[in-house]
Image (cartoon, grey):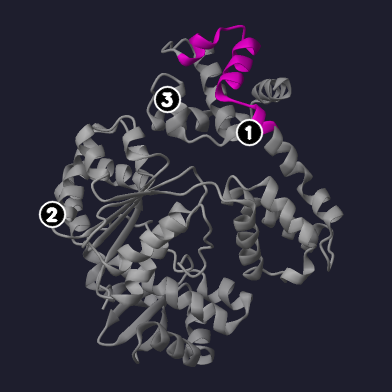
Amino acid sequence: MPESITELSNLWAKIKKLLEERIGDPRVSDVFLSKTRIYSYENDEIIVATETDLAATILNTKYQNIALEVVKEVLGKHVKISFAHSETLKKTAPQIQDEPQFFKNARINPSLTFDNFVSGPSNLEAKQAGVFVSANLGKSFNPLFIYSNPGLGKTHLLHAIANEIMANEPEKRCLYCEANDLIEQFLTNIKDNNSLMSFIRSFDVLLVDDVQFLALKEKTSEFFFQIFNFFLNQGKQVVITSDRHPQDLKGFEERLKSRFVQGLTVSIGQPDVQTCISIIKSKIDNGPISLEAFDPRVIEFIAEKFSKNIRDIDQALNKLIYYTSYFRPTKYISFETAMEALQPLVNVKDAKAKLSEQRIIAAVADYYQLVPSQITGPSRQADIALARHIAMYLIRVMLDTPFTKIGYTFGGKDHSTVMNGVTKVEKSLKTNTALQQAINEIKASL
């Protein structure tokens, strides 16, 4: 039986997804199920908190039988389920609410599985390693370290590993978190790190995404090193992802990098066109438009043009589906229609390929009659600081560069410093017409 907030959330995510599929009415999902959560799970009975009395009444009277079937399918046994307005449950809050609420936003996505991870030559080894580790926790290949460029499926594999473990060994507890979440939890609970440490150690499997963001975070890295050693010494499985090979990680102590490679290190390469075509077809099969509605040349074009990043494929498909469903509805998506819909993305993609951080910094420096070294340097002079924040903002929005990487470009500044600079520009743009004009002119020059 799930005992933590994370486990209850993961369980409800699975149940809710199946329940929404069985009901088959998006309006019911949006109105009655969207803000529900498991309030308690005791003595083979699940109580689900709803946002309103009406939602509880509708779900209890019209959909409870479907809910019972779904719960039995997920848990493999008969468990009662009922719905109640959250306001009526407040006085009898379950004991679990008194637990430390660490990693409240960390969730395992039940829809990301090995079954829907499309594999090809570029990622087959990583997928096979994930399947093996899921069935042999802590016995070998510990840690499993997966690295690749962004957007090639590392996060999908982490969730797939967790879902596979929970399906085959329900008693095992998996904690998935991004490295930035770990940093935030460590800093937020700086006075109570022992409780945070105990909480993490209580899990059987630790899955950490984008570990490169721990670079230069000396205290957080030391905290993570202790957790990492504990898991390995206790035979508990650790899976880590990064944007580069462990030996290429900068800002990490050698002792931690050497521990990263003591298990199994696998990479995910850029998918070939054929793999991209399979990925696109899989995504279309799970979408609102049938595969037969697409001109095959459209799928081939997307695969060839956006193959460097699966997120780019998602963006292109979403744009195309929106365009042909709402903006210019059509029953058949021809190559010509696809070109109309995707041309803005193609133009942006081509422009981004020609841009770089240094070109943007140089353009900002030229606009404000500065030299690039002033912008990337430590000066706090008001006009230089403004130019620096604008450059950070443009690099972020035009190149989608991670905050940490931007920090390196600007003399090793902390990612939070970069984030604050970008946020200041975003807020000022809402009311400052002079700033709007400046940024538009700099963009035009680029």
* Residue plotted at (53% across, 26% down): 392
Specify the quadrant that holds the C terminus. top right
Q: Determine crowd level at label 2: few under 14, some 14-19, many 20+ residues with C-alpha closer than 10 A.
A: few
Give the amino acid at mark 3.
Tyr
Pointer 2 or 1: first along the chain: 2
Give the amino acid at mark 1.
Lys
Q: Nearer the viewer, residue 445 or 5?
A: 445
Based on the displayed image, in which of its 4 quarters is residue 4 positioned? bottom left
In the picture as drawn, the residue positioned furthest to the front comes out as 121
Pointer 3 or 2: first along the chain: 2
* Residue plotted at (43% across, 90% down): 68
Based on the displayed image, in which of its 4 quarters is residue 74 positioned? bottom left
- Find the magenta span and give its range: 351-376
**Secondary structure at numbered mark 3:** helix
* Residue plotted at (24% across, 75% down): 171
Q: Nearer the viewer, mark 3 or mark 1?
A: 3
Q: Are marks 2 and 1 in contact (CB under 8 Å)?
A: no
Q: Nearer the viewer, mark 2 or mark 1?
A: 2
Q: Which residue is mark 3?
A: 408
Q: Nearer the viewer, mark 3 or mark 2?
A: 2
In the image, residue 369 lies at what x, y percent? 62, 6
Q: Which residue is mark 2?
A: 233
